[in-house]
């Protein structure tokens, strides 16, 4: 199979994945950005590169420390790749987008980290979905606790049984006294 004749970065001219490069200098000035940065963050690639926007300044203040710490730990090690936990990045209009990233460290002949290069994948919708599910789970837990409902659940494919502490208490047991198994549940059904 022949290789594509166009440079690989042209594949990232649009879409939810962007390529970005930044120097290992104070603030991490951006020296490369694919055109798809416009689709993800609303910045034109040239806008980021020509003004050497500090990449670290785009990272949400609550996430910045973790990304910087992971970067410096990997710069000090022999590892040349790392994947920070998902973090938020500020868009051109001031909103925040959740990003998944994988980063490669470029080093000079002495092994000093000089530059970072990686991809940014927009995972905002996934993060929002996970947060919505967690909020629903939290609300359901409040309903169960507030109404003192005993709850049990059986998965017939795996025979796994789950129940809450209120169900155990309704039967006169402490939560830890009942094994979460189908046989335990069956032994308590008339």
Image: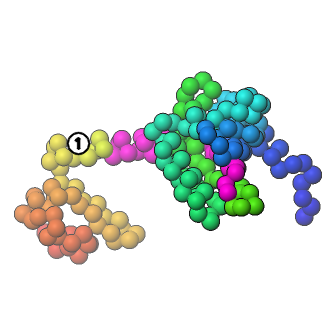
Magenta region includes residue 122:
yes
Magenta region includes residue 30:
no
Mark count: 1
Q: How far across and how far down the image is residue 106, in percent?
A: 71, 55
Q: How far across and how far down the image is residue 33, in percent?
A: 74, 39
- The residue shown at (14%, 70%) is 177
Badge 1 marks a residue whose secondary structure is helix
If the image is split into quadrants, where does the C terminus sit? bottom left
Q: Quadrant of residue 172?
A: bottom left
Disc 1: which residue: 143
In the current view of this chain or complex, which residue is farthest to the top?
93
In the current view of this chain or complex, which residue is farthest to the front?
110
Q: Does 40 sit left or right of 126 as displayed?
A: right
Q: Quadrant of residue 2?
A: bottom right
65 or 102: nearer the viewer: 65
Residue 98 is at least partly visible in this image: yes
Q: How far across and how far down the image is residue 183, in percent?
A: 23, 75
Report crowding for label 1: few under 14, some 14 to 19, many 20 or more residues within 10 A (C-alpha).
few
Residue 97 is at least partly visible in this image: no
Q: How far across and how far down the image is residue 105, in percent?
A: 67, 55
- The residue shown at (58%, 48%) is 100
Is 38 rendered above or below residue 119? Answer: above
Q: How is the image coloured?
A: rainbow
- The residue shown at (67%, 57%) is 112
Q: Which residues are magenta?
A: 112-137
- The residue shown at (89%, 54%) is 4
Q: Does 142 sit left or right of 58 as displayed?
A: left
Q: Quadrant of residue 30?
A: top right
Q: Does 175 sit left or right of 55 as displayed?
A: left
If the image is split into quadrants, where does the N terminus sit? bottom right
């Amino acid at each position: 199979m022949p290789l594509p004749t166009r440079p690989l970065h042209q594949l990232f001219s649009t879409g939810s994945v962007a390529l970005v490069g930044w120097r290992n200098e104070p603030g991490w000035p951006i020296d490369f950005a694919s055109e798809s940065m416009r689709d993800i963050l609303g910045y034109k690639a040239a806008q980021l590169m020509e003004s050497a926007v500090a990449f670290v300044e785009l990272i949400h203040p609550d996430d910045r420390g973790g990304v910087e710490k992971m970067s410096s730990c990997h710069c000090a090690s022999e590892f040349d790749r790392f994947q920070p936990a998902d973090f938020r990045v500020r868009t051109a209009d001031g909103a925040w987008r959740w990003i998944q990233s994988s980063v490669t460290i470029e080093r000079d002949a002495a092994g000093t980290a000089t530059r970072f290069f990686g991809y940014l994948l927009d995972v905002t919708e996934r993060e929002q979905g996970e947060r919505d599910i967690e909020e629903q789970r939290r609300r359901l837990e409040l309903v169960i606790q507030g109404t003192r409902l005993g709850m049990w659940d059986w998965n017939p494919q795996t025979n796994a049984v789950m129940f809450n502490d209120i169900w155990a208490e309704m039967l006169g047991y402490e939560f830890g006294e009942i094994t979460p198994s189908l046989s335990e549940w069956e032994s308590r059904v008339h």
